[in-house]
Image (cartoon, grey):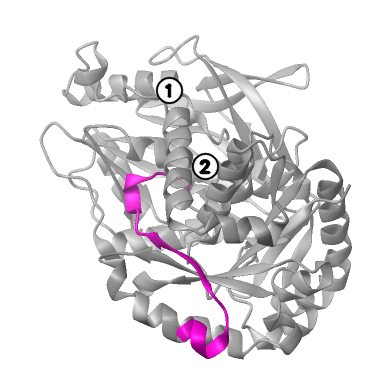
Amino acid sequence: MSANLLMLQGTGSSVGKSALVAGLCRLYRRRGVRVAPFKAQNMALNSFITPQGDEIGRAQAVQAEACGLEPHVDMNPVLIKPNSDIGAQVIVNGKPVSNMSATVYHNYKETAWQAVSSSLARLREKYELIIIEGAGSPAEINLRDKDIVNMGLATRVKAPVLLIGDIDKGGVFASLIGTLELLEEDEQELIKGFIVNKFRGDVTLLEPGLVTITARCGVPFVGVVPWFGREIYLPEEDGVALEIDEAKGLKGANSEQILAIGVIKLPHISNFTDFDPLLHEPQVRLDYLEPQAALVGYHLIILPGSKNTLEDLARLHDADLPRRLRAFIEAGGAVIGICGGFQMLGKRLLDPEMIESGRGEIEGFGLLPVTTEMAPEKITVQCRARVTASCFGSGLEVSGYEIHQGRTTLEGVAEPLLQVTQNDGQYADGFIADQGRVWGSYMHGIFDDDGFRSAYLNWLREQIGLGSGGQASDAGVAKISYQQRKEDGLNSLTDLLSTSLDMKMIDELVGL
């Protein structure tokens, strides 16, 4: 049996494709359909490691959760992780192939198509329905000849397409019509419906436009999805979300009882969803800060992951952040580094084979007695660990995943943060300095763990004089688990889509 297909494409990036795919996946799962997500080629710095140790886009991991499935590399066979303005690491079937320029990758696409085609075929044998997500816009006519993710994919597999327009950006009717006009005739025939996403206001005022557009081009509107903002939580696809948040001023309220956390917004920031659980904590404010931003008023500064750690560290040196962070710690602040941020906290970073950038070596912050050297083979594993830190969380069990090229070596005395168990072996990960005020780790997802997050935030509050009080409400620890927040977000989105989309029309498109 070969599964039926439905494809969602957009008039541009960040129009809501990933979220709508996740919502439709959950909706069909509710109805007992064996459904799975698929994105042929994803360009994103938020990635996830499958149980098999393969690297895929974070969005497809969330969509797999919506389907009640473990994430698998077949759901995203090609992942592109930009590490410069003109180049990226290309990952095929979950493993890095090489760093490529845009031109080199464009010529590589026929090879990449073999992985895409094979993955989709395997999924179609296992499930009844595959919901496919496009990337960017199908109207990028300069890339049409070798497209494998939008209409190039749709025409090869004859997938019906719903085209999404973001009305919050303005010009939604022009973007829908313009996209359609730039498609070839056989591509236009696959566009079976339009979706208007992120609508605010009275839908009756929109209806004359819907009627006019359908009369002009013959494509019906499948629905108008209301703006749901942060009322419905889903992990974000990429760094565009950080720019939107900053532009709209989505900051927490200031208060003497608020724990203020700043995440340094690196030029090549990756896996920033590591810190989403902190966003949802009551009495916690989390801001993304430019490297040159003032640190006054914050209690904790986090250095996140990076796809180009050495170049980003150079930018932080230019912003005098190492000196300012040392002063911040001396004044009572705390500093955390995750993955690339952990490497930055050490003494030196070495890249003798120029794996990440053109820099062979750069001085670190010197806040942890470690040195990191980039290696050709990338570590991509899921793992479990026991917290060994005596100052907070000792004995707690946590789980997460590692994605890094670097190999970090201890060059002094420091207390390990975690004892990791992976593939029947054990090793220490992460180190602590300044009685817990500085620590780093390779473990992505450590803050997803409610117990660890609670223990660390309580410890930090006590250190800065806010006090935990021993109760969740006093400590500012969420009364609902992070996993439950994700589930609630998926379910709420599904409820919204079930009432705002013409599901009878969609069912007919997918043959259900």
Q: Secondary structure at mark 2?
A: loop
Q: Is residue 128 above or below residue 140?
A: above
Helix, strand or loop at label 1? It is helix
Q: Residue at x 71, y 37 (%)?
A: 50
Number of the label disc, if any, that sits on residue 347: 2
Q: Is residue 377 visible?
A: no
Residue at 76% across, 84% down: 186
Where's residue 499, x and y in %? 43, 51
Q: Tell me if residue 138 can be seen.
A: yes
Specify the label residue 450 is tagged with: 1
Q: Earlier in the sequence, mark 2 or mark 1?
A: 2
Residue 233 within the magenta-colored segment of the rendering: yes
Highlighted range, magenta: 213-235
Graded by Cα atoms within 10 Å as few (under 14), some (14 to 19) or many (20 or more), the crowding at tag 2 reads: some
Mark 2 to mark 1 CA distance (whole Å)? 31 Å
Which percent across, then down, holds residue 479?
32, 22
